[in-house]
Amino acid sequence: MRIDVLTLFPEMFTGPLDHSIVGRARERGILDVRLTNIRDFATDKHRQVDDAPYGGGPGMVMKPEPVFAAVEAVIARARQEGAAEPPHVILLDPQGSVFSQARAWELAEKEHLVLICGHYEGVDERVRTLADEELSIGDFVLTGGELPAMVVIDAVCRLLPGAIGEAESARQESFEGFVLDHPHYTRPAEFRGMAVPEVLLGGHHEEIRRWRRKEALRRTMQRRPDLLAKAPLSEEDLRFLEELRAEAEGGEP
Ligand code: 9D3
């Protein structure tokens, strides 16, 4: 997959994209990330990329011309390099639809993404016409679209074939994200008086699988009942949930 990132702050991306799974995917050629500084497409003598809002008010708005020129240059370059289809263009914006694991799976199918990062008070409204979709990463205020772009790249990258180990990939399903993880332990078996659950020490694989699934459901029920409502549940899951309900019932004074 190829991802072009258009930003006024390309330096922000060095670090997060150079390490761990994303760094390795880039080394292996699974992911090709290219950074474009929108300022390089400013044409006036001051290389101005933002301006005061029409109608007045505080803050600055990103001018449309450099963003349009940058997106058009990236699209033209991809076509020259033999791309069959035009890229999927995403504007990172607080007004976008909220990014999700389901959206990450869909984006992982694309050959080429273009991520446009706004900064300051946002982009000129006409920039929206460049985008196939607008994405937010949640209801909190950041200073720009750069961190959200990195979040999207990270989430999509680990879904690309070959990005993570075979064992882990096999566990990845499109259902991922509906049930929280079970508790994890490593050595020592007892730490500051806190013991690892007996079942995990025994090596009885089927018993361990059942324990993990039940604990995953317990956590999800306790912390994120909203997820459980959407989760595809097996007959066994429903039995575990019934047991958990009974345990909770029995726990009452
Ligand atoms: C304080 C300015 N806000 C007035 C209501 C609007 C605003 C404009 C630009 C708020 C944040 C930003 C910069 N943020 C992003 O560009 C952004 C973002 C975010 O802030 N939160 C979650 N997802 C995203 S995606 C892009």
Image: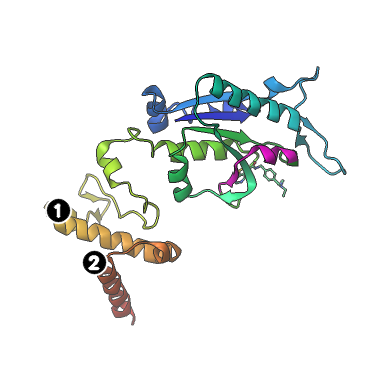
In the image, ligand 1 is in what quadrant? Answer: top right
Q: Is residue 136 magenta?
A: yes
Q: Residue at x 39, y 31 (%)?
A: 20
Residue wearing tag 1:
205
Task: Identify the mark nearer the N-term, 2 or 1.
Answer: 1
Residue wearing tag 2:
236
The answer, for residue 141, to whether it is visible in the render is no
154 sits to left or right of 47: left
Residue extending farthest to the top is: 45
Q: Is residue 35 above or below residue 181?
A: above
118 sits to left or right of 239: right
The one nearer the camera, 85 or 130, is 85
Q: Amino acid under label 1?
A: His
- Residue 211: % across, % down: 22, 60
Q: In this view, does 226 lie above or below 56?
A: below
The reply to whether discs 2 and 1 touch (Cβ–Cβ < 8 Å) is no
Task: Give me the C-alpha separation between circle 2 and circle 1.
Answer: 16 Å
Magenta stretch: give its range: 126-137
Q: In this view, does 245 lie above or below 14?
A: below
- Residue 95: % across, % down: 65, 49
The answer, for residue 114, to whether it is visible in the render is yes
- Residue 45: % across, % down: 81, 17
Q: Is mark 2 within 8 Å of ligand 1?
A: no
Q: Residue at x 50, y 40 (%)?
A: 152
Q: Residue at x 74, y 42 (%)?
A: 125
- Residue 131: % across, % down: 63, 39
Q: Amino acid under label 2?
A: Glu
Which class describes the residues within 10 Å of circle 1: few (<14), some (14-19), or many (20+)? few
Secondary element under disc 1, as helix, strand or loop, is: helix
Q: Is mark 1 within 8 Å of ligand 1?
A: no
